[in-house]
Image (tube, coloured by chain):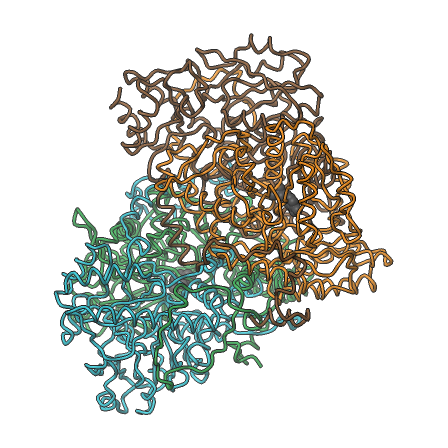
Chain colours: A cyan, B green, C orange, D brown
């Protein structure tokens, strides 16, 4: 290309090789053996061909939840998030020219603070699991203690991430049991586990079983520790927020708020806390300030907590986070508004309850937990988990989460069981398809 | 003549309207009988018309700068063209609307793409195995260091508590060390900005778990002592970690593997052209040599000749570092980019990136100080200290650049360069736009002399004027409920 | 505080670069042996990098105003919210990548949508049959008038050479008459801005082929003599044509059919929320009563209870008015819009549009002259003549509005209102934005008094200042080869 | 809604009905019997379900052309055309705030003028067919004459549109024959048809048979009339443009330049002419001017030709046109550039020629026209057109245009024949599929 030639002339070099003379011959390679490049159209065909091997939730009803959820996403959310100026931006290092992203993230933080009832939220963590890891570390930073007590009925992946996050601190993870009948926190046992080594107690509402647990309202009373609560943010359109029952840190999965499932990534870690702890909080924070003319302006703030300034002493190593997912969520919440969020929570509870009743009316399918559920529930099933799963697939419907098969048998007391998720997107005919197929093996 | 769009945009909470978006099955509500103590009573979020919301964010977007608008020469960030086809692909139902727990027979396409990407990254990194799970560069570092720890623990080599990093390292390197439970030992760079071999020797000991560097380093200089460094580190029983954020300077020319590294993380959102999204999501896969493979996070994608599957049976796995399999939609984009480029294409990416950097380097030389040697790879770091005599700082240069509709370089990093201006043009800038960038920076150096006040008051042509960052930190207003 | 984005944007031909886009099968070229006389030797189009091109147009887009940014109260244009779901739907392969000659068994989805849309439009228009073929409102008018001609010719009523239009008519009405071979007779409006019945009676004769009106008319006033008008026209053997651009004022309240019209064209890009695309593509389907059905263009979509098909067997068809079946991708959007609204929704659209108009009407009254009666439907026309005494014209008001980040109303139309300002807010404006619009216009009326020069020099905050339109027409520079 | 209530109060009305009191009761209706509205997600599901009954060119190779063509469209083109500021704009009535669209359309006009070799182009017509209609009317406006001579081998739809466009003027349409062997203009016959009533002669290159016809270079010599040439704009990357062989008006289908097929609409009518005729040209025209500060600016110009000013005396009634399609095309041409356009033309010719040879090598398939072709060619086939068509469909491939079945038997001399189109997007495997299927019935 002419331009390359001109630049080379300017540099006084004859060949591009000369730009690499500082690389020792011994380490040079012959090239990358990964095939030739293709034109866009050929790739378009190829991608369609490969991806057509996937079955999306538009091609098959799917009743999976367990951490990642299907919800209706307004077309406008995609439209906003695909604005070039948002998605091709870097972190807003120059705030004067990045007000759009900064204000949007400020709105996201405000939304999360309102939903969770906490004072402040950061501009995102990677996902729910790493948010838990960060929360545990933050608890340690707050009170210097070394034990975190978590529910036994936690998703194993989350526990595994937590383990890795606290490993470096040498923190100990202790599990508290749940009540077998209700699926709720066994408060007595939890109480007994708490002592002066307790850095934090972690509770979820709704929990991994989809159970809405009023015990979370009373955990705070059990002692002096950092109380971490994990929530489904959509449930907060209706349910009391952690900030109102003494949580120090609220975390959750923000994918639920307007982000597609994307095979589990990107997700969006929600992280909110009390103002008194803000300087211990990991992650980016956007603040409101003024410009030279006194006009309102937004800027990244409290950066002295962060790696690029504090380096080894930073609250976390997080740098790139999930800003665009937060944009999706801000837009999503804005479209729904208070009335929409409330209604959405109600629809989810209603639909799930309806389906739960339908399933329980089939012989052999038994309600595992005698409680209020949000949009998920565990059903004890009459045959082997994997067998039922395959049967459903053969009927063109994807069942729920296999409670023991996929969790290294974490829940032996349940026997064969499935965790079903139902949201506003499941149509009557999806539900019929599921129930009919279940009935075949009752 | 540039002026950024300015809309006097309210906060969404200050708007007023009614919800017009309908929710599916909105009218099918049972009586839920939720105990009152569990119900919330207020929620300070307002309703608005769909259209009002849409416009709000479209207007906000116009007050944001993205690489689709113009040059974005942020050093270390590799702000290159984000191919539009990748966006088209990830908007397909078969990417967006699949659940991570779906039966593997129903996600063969997804698994194939992940598998192929693993294979490509192995070749590009010169590694033996790859995990796609880490969701950002820093997460890759953390994962890499967990692998370091697992490796030493497995070998019962338990006294290794230190990670060595050069003082030119990115902040995530020491921060990740801390997260993984290590003490960071920072060693000074030598007079060439490279690893000071004596300092390294001195720092290395049987307490050393790993040495983390990037090569080319954050100055954009390739350290030709790399094989010697590897020898020294390995001799001491430590591992050599490669911060892959700078891979754009060497693809197809050399590999971290070939240079003797044991571990590398890739920044797909830098080298492999996935969008930065205003600060993420990214993806930070990690490659390792054979001896570390048994510690990788689960699952890894494998192919049995007929189908692709998630393999959870990794002998001494560290477990998980993120909720699922990594940032899948980002992985798909990187896969698409690599497919489009192919082996030769990636090599040409590096060649052009390096050509562009050196072109800028030579054009700006004389106008800004250029510490250290001339030849650079993917980026070049200037110093604005020559402007100090006019009372102008690098920050002022950066702000003034915005007035010309060009984003500023990374400033004040790496820390070893005073008043640093770190420029990474990437291969996707045309000569035209490089010239424009150079012209603007040269003009500003001139302005610094002639009208320093202008620089100190810049920017003028952006949505807002210079922002008081000190006040923001002193009296933090972090949500709308904190507004007085 | 508004400022539109300003980029000092070159013409694409002034840029410099190399092509980076690859074309499929680019390297498989045979020796073609084309005779030299058939080959071109030069082509003044330049090559550019993909990214340079992309940025060029993204920057240009920022210098354009769209309804996604803010209120766009162009009267007669019905600039309402374009639902984003419609855009999502039309981006599907099954819309974009189907060929009009495909076997009908492979396009059943397309045909179903067209069929359903025909049915919906019949109901909304109160008509018996619909053709989707016309690709814009004016094309619909032209088609309608070809049907008028076919009707009279069929009846051997060959002396009908005139089309009557009111002087408040849109320019396309007389222009379409001419295209269809008719002489246009313009009749004056009465003192209420409505059809002057006496003038109509006088104009009507056995030379009259049709009377073209819109009701509510372009002033936004509903003509309650409509049944009398229909009687007069039909009595004379002429047909009554409805310009459907103003349908937003009556949907669900009445229909053209019910009012006695024989023919109506719909502007899907107005009433049915398809985007205007900066001036098209639109779609202008035409509905007719029974007696005109046999003349419709071919094909029409029909359903035989099992499948949908294109019916070319229309007895006395006028043939074709556009290459294929109309602007399919626009039709799909309109179909989606109607589905989303449903019958009640469309009625509410009209109710809210009319409420919004009357709200604006009352808020602005006193600040601008309001000729004719108060109650309006979908739009309202003010006059800026009260500002003349300050030397300010409606054009100046319009230009000044741009400075506040709001688009101007339609100006100088309809011709019967001096210094016309024709405002159509549509139903999708929130009260908030209506208030903002009103505030801006009231403030400008004030400015006209206090600082008329400012208005005459406006706009200041747009990408360019006021443009010399006279010079543009006097010395036309219409392509870059004409640039001196 | 509260806002509606407030506005009603402001207006002093109690019910919305009061806003419709001017509508006589006799014409009021009860409502629209078209069903209830649905939420976005339900519609999304419904649209996907209905549209899945279509088979797109990504699901089945399609060898149809005949006016609408499949080409590779860079993803960037969609990205540009889906910028809100472009697609949600109206006609740029206020140029100061619409420079983006105006400059883009100016670039489009320039591209068309360069490609066709004409002086000026308008900012778009509806499609090729209506552009022909407008060209005929313009010829009449230029010389006041009343006959237009067009090729016998013209797409019937185009002829039908032309008829409607000239009907009002009372113009006569006369057809000139083509040479049966070559498929090219029968120059002798054409010459004999031209006389002093001839308003215009219309010729196409490549023509409806895909034949590249050098006779178009010599039509100008046949007399004094408005010479209208119809082109495939992509062919102009390689072939001599109409402006260089005496055309007064050049028209064509712009869909080919970066617009999707969209089942035949929207399309994009290309229209270019000589400067001397510009004031007779229909359609919008963008001109370059200056603003108050002397900076370059763009504006709609020569509007006195148009309906909103000249009303009954306008050159055309056209108002909304196909501006966004012109944006697609401007972006498309910009991505390809001169080198890309040339190469694209070469690929199309090459691929089509390759396939033509392959097909002709099968027994029973005979080349209809012994000429150079662009990207289409007519093949005489061994069996009934519809039968072959169905056979191909049964093999998962969509054949070409059925020359007689779909044209009201306009080409009896061809017998059973198919017009195949091949472009750069047809893969080797698409071609194999077609050829294999054809071979089965040889
Ligand atoms: C050299 C270097 N290392 C690591 C990182 C961290 O990557 P991430 O932001 O993806 O966590 C960066 C990011 O800027 C970097 O430039
Ligand atoms: C009243 C009226 N009639 C007809 C038309 C012509 O419609 P189109 O621009 O789609 O050709 C318009 C467009 O502005 C209009 O407002």
Q: From the viewer's perspective, is C348 left or right of A138?
A: right
Residue D349 horizontal/vertical position (percent): 42, 24
At a point 66% along the width and 17% down the height, the residue shown is: D225
Q: From the viewer's perspective, is B353 left or right of C165?
A: left
The answer to whether one can see residue B401 in this image is no
Front residue (pair D90, D150)? D150
Q: Is residue B258 above or below residue B63?
A: above
Specify the farthest residue to the front: C235
Front residue (pair D429, B17)? B17
Residue A311 horizontal/vertical position (percent): 40, 72
Q: Is residue B399 above or below residue D436?
A: below
Residue C323 horizontal/vertical position (percent): 52, 32
**Disc count in the image?**
0
Front residue (pair B211, B118)? B118
The answer to whether one can see residue D386 in this image is yes
Q: From the viewer's perspective, is A361 left or right of C193?
A: left
Residue C86 horizontal/vertical position (percent): 47, 51
Specify the farthest residue to the right: C389
- Residue D150 lies in quadrant: top right
Which image quarter has ligand 1?
A: bottom left
Image quadrant occupied by the C terminus of chain A: bottom left
Front residue (pair C420, A126)? C420
């Amino acid at each position: 290309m002419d331009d390359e030639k001109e630049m080379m002339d300017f540099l006084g070099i004859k060949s591009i090789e000369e730009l690499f003379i500082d690389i020792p011959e011994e380490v040079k390679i012959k090239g990358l053996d990964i095939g030739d490049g293709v034109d866009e159209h050929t790739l378009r065909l190829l991608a369609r061909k490969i991806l057509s091997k996937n079955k999306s939730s538009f091609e098959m009803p799917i009743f999976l939840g367990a951490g990642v959820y299907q919800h209706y996403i307004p077309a406008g959310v995609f439209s906003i998030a695909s604005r070039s100026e948002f998605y091709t931006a870097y972190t807003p290092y120059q705030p004067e020219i990045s007000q759009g992203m900064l204000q949007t993230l400020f709105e996201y933080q405000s939304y999360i603070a309102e939903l969770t009832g906490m004072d402040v939220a950061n501009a995102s963590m990677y996902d729910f699991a790493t948010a838990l890891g960060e929360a545990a570390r933050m608890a340690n930073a707050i009170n210097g203690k070394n034990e975190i007590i978590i529910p036994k009925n936690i998703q194993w992946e989350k526990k595994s991430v937590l383990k890795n996050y606290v490993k470096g601190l040498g923190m100990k993870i202790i599990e508290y049991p749940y009540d077998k009948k209700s699926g709720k926190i066994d408060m007595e046992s939890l109480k007994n586990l708490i002592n002066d080594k307790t850095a934090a107690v972690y509770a979820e509402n709704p929990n991994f079983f989809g159970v809405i647990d009023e015990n979370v309202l009373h955990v705070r009373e059990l002692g002096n520790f950092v109380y971490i609560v994990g929530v489904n943010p959509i449930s907060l359109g209706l349910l009391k927020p952690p900030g109102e029952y003494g949580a120090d840190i609220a975390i959750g999965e923000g994918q639920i708020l307007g982000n597609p499932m994307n095979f589990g990534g990107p997700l969006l870690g929600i992280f909110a806390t009390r103002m008194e702890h803000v300087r211990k909080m990991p992650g980016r924070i956007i603040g409101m300030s003024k410009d030279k003319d006194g006009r309102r302006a937004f800027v990244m703030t409290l950066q002295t907590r962060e790696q690029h300034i504090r380096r080894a002493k930073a609250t976390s190593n997080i740098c790139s986070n999930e800003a665009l997912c937060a944009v999706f969520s801000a837009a999503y919440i804005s479209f729904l508004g208070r009335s929409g969020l409330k209604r959405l929570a109600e629809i989810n509870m209603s639909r799930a309850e309806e389906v739960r009743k339908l399933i329980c009316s089939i012989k052999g399918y038994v309600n595992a937990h005698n409680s209020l559920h949000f949009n998920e529930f565990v059903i004890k099933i009459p045959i082997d988990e994997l067998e039922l799963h395959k049967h459903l697939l053969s009927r063109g419907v994807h069942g729920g989460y296999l409670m023991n098969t996929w969790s290294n048998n974490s829940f032996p007391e349940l026997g064969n069981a499935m965790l079903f998720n139902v949201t506003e997107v499941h149509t009557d005919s999806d539900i019929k398809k599921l129930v009919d197929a279940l009935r075949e093996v009752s | 003549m540039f002026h950024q769009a300015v809309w006097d945009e309210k906060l969404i909470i200050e708007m007023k309207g009614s919800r017009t978006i309908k929710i599916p099955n909105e009218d099918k509500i049972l009586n839920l009988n939720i105990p009152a103590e569990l119900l919330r009573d207020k929620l300070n979020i307002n309703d608005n018309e769909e259209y009002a919301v849409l416009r709000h964010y479209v207007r906000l977007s116009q007050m944001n700068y993205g690489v689709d608008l113009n040059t974005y020469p942020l050093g270390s960030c590799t702000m290159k063209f984000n191919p539009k086809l990748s966006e088209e692909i990830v908007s397909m139902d078969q990417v967006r609307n699949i659940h991570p727990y779906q039966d593997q027979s129903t996600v063969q396409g997804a698994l194939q793409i992940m598998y192929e990407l693993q294979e490509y990254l192995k070749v590009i990194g010169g590694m033996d195995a790859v995990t796609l799970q880490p969701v950002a560069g820093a997460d890759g570092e953390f994962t890499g260091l967990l692998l370091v720890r697992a490796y030493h623990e497995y070998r019962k080599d338990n006294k290794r508590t230190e990670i060595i990093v050069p003082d030119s390292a990115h902040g995530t390197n020491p921060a990740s060390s801390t997260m993984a439970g290590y003490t960071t030992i920072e060693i000074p760079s030598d007079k060439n900005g490279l690893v000071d071999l004596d300092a390294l020797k001195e720092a290395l000991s049987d307490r050393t778990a790993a040495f983390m560097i990037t090569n080319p380093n954050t100055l954009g200089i390739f350290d030709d002592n790399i094989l010697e460094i590897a020898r020294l580190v390995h001799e001491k029983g430590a591992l050599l970690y490669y911060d892959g954020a700078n891979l754009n300077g060497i693809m197809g020319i050399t590999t971290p593997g070939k240079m003797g590294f044991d571990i590398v993380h890739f920044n797909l959102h830098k080298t492999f052209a996935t969008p930065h999204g205003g600060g993420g999501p990214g993806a930070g896969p990690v490659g390792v040599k054979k001896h570390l493979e048994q510690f990788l996070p689960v699952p890894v994608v494998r192919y049995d000749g007929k189908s692709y599957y998630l393999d959870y049976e990794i002998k001494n796995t560290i477990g998980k570092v993120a909720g699922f399999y990594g940032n899948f939609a980002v992985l798909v984009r990187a896969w698409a980019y690599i497919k489009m480029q192919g082996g030769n294409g990636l090599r040409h990416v590096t060649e052009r990136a390096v050509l562009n950097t050196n072109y800028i380097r030579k054009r700006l030389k004389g106008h800004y100080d250029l510490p250290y040697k001339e030849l650079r790879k993917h980026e070049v770091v200037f110093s604005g200290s020559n402007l100090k005599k006019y009372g102008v700082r690098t920050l002022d240069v950066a702000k003034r650049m915005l007035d010309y509709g060009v984003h500023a370089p990374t400033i004040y990093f790496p820390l070893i360069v005073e008043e640093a201006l770190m420029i990474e043009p990437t291969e996707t800038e045309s000569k035209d736009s490089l010239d424009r960038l150079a012209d603007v920076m040269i003009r500003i150096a001139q302005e610094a002399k002639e009208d320093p006040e202008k620089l100190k008051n810049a920017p003028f042509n952006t949505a807002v004027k210079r922002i008081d960052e000190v006040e923001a930190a002193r009296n933090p207003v972090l949500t709308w409920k904190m507004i007085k």
